Amino acid sequence: MHGTTLLVALLLIGLVARSNLIAMAACVLLIIKLANLNFLFPLLERRGLEVGLLFLLLSILVPVATGKINEREMLYNLTSLPGLLALFGGALATHLNGEGLRLLQLQPEIIFGLVIGSIFGIVFMGGVPVGPLMAAGITALFMELAFWLKQ
């Protein structure tokens, strides 16, 4: 029953914090674990992030597909100040996400703190839980800054 207690704790935390995504993720993993479908864990670990990002991108690109955003508007936004800032923000965010992914691969146990911190952000700061990857990226940045300041 290794890990079951933590998954139940995450499920309860997700329910209390009204974070349906955290509660559902913990619930799905509990079902997989209790149904002895352990062969799914490596698949989820390897491809789950890609599938999640695919659905995130699909939802973001719907306005393009439906014609709510046209080519002229996209071109203008790439050359305007908000568009240029969005380019910089996107580049910085993807860099931080890469750092976060490396951190999660090196220290997977940090996920619990990221989830608890995300729940605090949802409950007390009105945040939106888009995923632990950006939280891990920011954590990696903080860790790098702490290491740099310590020297």
Image (tube, rainbow, N blue to C red):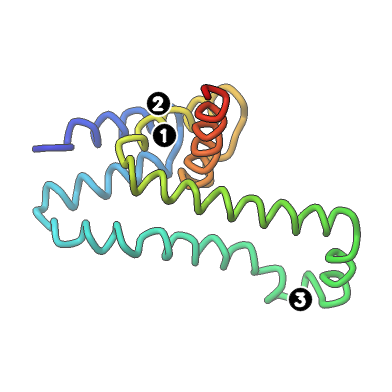
79 horizontally vs 145: left or right: right
For disc 2, the marked residue is 16
| Amino acid of disc 1 | Val
Distance of label 2 from label 3 (alpha carbons):
39 Å
Tag 3 residue: 67
Q: As rendered, which of 44 and 134 lies closer to the eye?
A: 134
Nearer to me, 113 or 28: 113
Local SS, label 2: helix
- Residue at coordinates 53% horizontally, 26% vertically from top-left? 146
Q: Are marks 1 and 3 in contact (CB under 8 Å)?
A: no
On screen, 19 above or below 39?
above
- Find residue 48 and report its horizontal and vertical position in percent: 36, 60
Q: Secondary structure at mark 1?
A: helix
Q: Position of residue 65 (x, y in %)?
A: 68, 76
The disc, 1 or 3, on the residue closer to the chain's N-terminal end is: 3
Residue at 50% over, 53% down? 98
Q: Residues within 10 Å of mark 1 (few under 14, many from 20)?
A: many
Mark 2 and mark 1: Cα distance apart in space = 13 Å
Instruction: Look at discs 2 and 1 and give the one toward the viewer.
Output: 1
User: Residue 5, located in which quarter of the rendered image?
Assistant: top left
Q: Is residue 123 above or below residue 83?
A: above
Q: Which mark is residue 115?
A: 1
Circles 2 and 3: CB atoms closer than 8 Å? no
Which amino acid, by three-letter code, is at mark 2? Answer: Val
- Residue 130 is situated, as x and y percent measured from the top left of the image, at 53, 46
Which marked residue is nearer to the observer: mark 1 or mark 3?
A: 1
Q: Residue furthest front?
A: 151
